[in-house]
Image (spheres, rainbow, N blue to C red):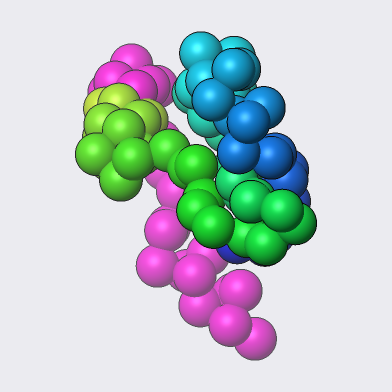
Amino acid sequence: MTEGIMKIEVGAYEAKTKLPELLRGVQVGKQYTITNRGVAIADLVQAKTARHHETAAAVEQMKAFMAKNPVKDVDIKGLIEEGRA
């Protein structure tokens, strides 16, 4: 298990025959452990570059939202200090 995400075990033969389906699963966040005779051999997980692009897109969406919806008359520093109490 990684970061609280359960990896689904898949036999090597099944992984070979269902690779496109497994890749679609990876695209939506699923993780697979490929086994050979019950022994874990490899993990099929989303590439780091894909996660980076998703993170960068989320940051850009947040920036756009903040630009359209500015926070006014709020003491951010005061709120932070209040949270530390």
Does residue 16 belong to the magenta stretch? no
Tell me the quarter of the picture where residue 65 sits: top left
Q: Residue furthest bottom?
A: 85
- The residue sitting at 31% across, 33% down in the picture is 50
* Residue 38, image quadrant: bottom right
Residue 35 vs residue 9: left or right?
left
Q: Quadrant of residue 82?
A: bottom right
Residue 72 lies in the magenta-colored region: yes
Q: Which residues are magenta?
A: 61-85
7 or 75, which is in the foreground?
A: 7
Image quadrant for the N terminus? bottom right
Residue depicted at x 61% and y 74%? 83
Residue 4 horizontal/vertical position (percent): 69, 59
- The secondary structure that dominates the magenta segment is helix
Q: Residue at x 50, y 53 (%)?
A: 42
* x and y, in percent, of residue 73 in the image: 42, 43
On the question of residue 3 being in view, the answer is: no
* x then y, percent, for residue 81: 51, 77
Q: How many marks?
A: 0
Residue 44, placed above or below residue 66: below
x, y percent for residue 9: 73, 45
Viewer-proximal residue, 4 or 83?
4
Q: Residue at x 33, y 16 (%)?
A: 68
